[in-house]
Image (cartoon, rainbow, N blue to C red):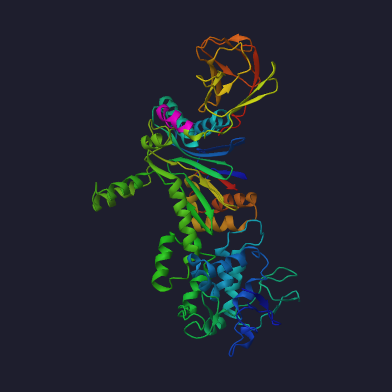
Amino acid sequence: MMYEIRSYIGTRKVQEDAYGGCMTDNGMFVVVCDGIGGSAHGKESSQFTAERLTELFRTEYTGNFPHFILKAAESADTEINEKYGGRCGTTAVAVHICSGELNWFSVGDSRLYIMRNGRLKQITTDHNYGYVLELRKQKGLIDEDTFRREMNRAEHLASYIGMGGMDIVDLSLKPFLLEKGDKLLVTTDGLYKSLTEDIIYDIIYSENDIFSAADALRNAVMKCTAPTDNTTFALIYT
Amino acid sequence: MKLKRCPNSHYYDGDKYEQCPHCSAVKAPAPAPKPVIEPAPQPKTDEPAAEKKPVTVPAAKPEPILQAPVKADDKPENIDPAPAVPVPEKKASFVENVSKESSPVKEETWRCSCGSVNSGKFCFECGSPRPEPKKEEKQDNGWKCICGAENKGKFCFQCGTPRPQTTPEKNAPVQEKPLPVHNMPDPEISASVNKTEIPVHTQAPAVKDRSLTEQISESSFTGNIEDARKKAAPPDDEGVTQILFDDINDGFVLAWLTVTNTSSKGKVFTITTPKCTVGRGDAEHIADIDLHNDRSISRGVQAIIVYDPLNKKFFLQNAEGKTYAYVNKEMVLTYKELNPYDIIMLGQTKMVFVPLCSDRFSW
């Protein structure tokens, strides 16, 4: 079991992505954060969150990952909110793997993918306005027109750490059993907005080891001609 | 099934055929699917099992049909992508797909560019993939029934099952699948598409895919954090004791007490209940740990050893008997936590406490 993290600033001036990871007796923990808020401390928010979650995992984790990570994320949420007054924040997607069991937590639009049986499957949901609109439409709270009108803001985040009381989260309530050969991809939006899932899959698939796959992924993002967002991702081979 | 190999290196079921059905086939040499696969270097271990299973397991039945015409290409999908194999199956099958359309070869064996003659999917000398196709020939002339029989007509001569609709056009997408599988947005979609046309075909991969989706949705929660918090929270105190005590079956060892003096020296008491009474029993009194040899102990329960399964700790609790209980020469008036190798003294009897359950292990 190993992980490789790559980070690329893209065409932005500031790298607001952050990451953390550790391996302890309690398993492997990897977190990837994408700071938001531009000049308003997006970078600090993501760094703080990545470090805090990793540190808490290293020192305080004893079991029950969902409970642990919710508490940890909420403490980070409160702290960032109090420190910067809610003008900035960060997404976070954290995974924990211990004895073949995968647990995850996500808030915001960073993603966790699993690669199995020849396909790349997104596990987490993007917590953006689009998701909220979908929900509202499903429940009949808004009509088709409103839905379409509002969907141009679909990418706005609906939930993130630092908003002072996260709204939506993704969480594994039951460990997900990994199979031999499963590969995981934990990434910020920079990667999946620059490369399609097919290309991501092909790149990972065509590389023999985790190092070259991670490098190839980053290089592919670097080669994108379109402006690219901050990109940070962790590849995990089980 | 008795797997046999004919001089032309076809594989066939020896129970069903006296001689190789492929060679005796009238028209084309109908390159049987199996020979293509079995000698294939990479998934050797997985393949035979995957192939045989469907014949007996009804749930997987569709697979053989699908494998008959498309086997070689289909393989990479059905097998777990073996990560250890350096040659990605996808590439291999891709190469095959491409070359397949270009040059149809009927021969079962083939000559690699390195000069060696092979019968498998890859050259045994240099590992390069078999450069030939013959799929189309096969599709036109033969098909393999789910019962395992090789057929040419419209119905299986063994069991009467109609020939599945496997025209080359329909096969084409299946063959290419190794490449664009991930294009399929959802297994459900692929399943439904196939159901209308060729129900059997992609069912196998679809099932696997769906199980991944299902597996994810079983673990996954997306929604309001309040709900998440409730669901992720450990059971609250009310529930805890009962649940945890229920989890520990009576009779499971929790700890041991070993007597180190008196005439019972060396005797071991095994603590198997979370609330274990210690004392001296008689007709009217029962103690789980009965120190009946020690007359200095009053009759009845003198102390209780309590196991806290939540915190995985043991305590010695005073039971308000007439006899004093000590832990490490400290009198226990209410309760005291027991640590490994603590010495409990009751009357004259000294016992060493050795726990099994602790932070490192618990039922």
Q: Residue A18, percent across and down? A: 53, 37
| Left-right relation of B221 to B321 | left
**The C terminus of chain B lies in which quarter of the figure?**
top right
Q: Nearer the viewer, residue B267 or B204?
A: B267
Q: Residue A5's quadrant in the figure?
A: top right
Q: Nearer the viewer, residue B18 or B202?
A: B18
The stretch drawn in magenta includes residue A192: no
**The N terminus of chain B lies in which quarter of the figure?**
bottom right
Q: Is residue B171 above or below residue A101?
A: below
State the extent of the magenta-drawn residues as a range. B235-245
- Outermost front residue: B283
Secondary structure, magenta segment, majority class: helix
Residue A196 seen from this side: no
Residue visible at 45% across and 62% down in the picture: B184
Q: Is residue B220 above or below residue B23?
A: above
Q: Nearer the viewer, residue B290 or B338?
A: B290
Q: Residue A212, percent across and down? A: 64, 52
Residue B171 seen from this side: yes
Q: Residue B334, percent across and down? A: 51, 12
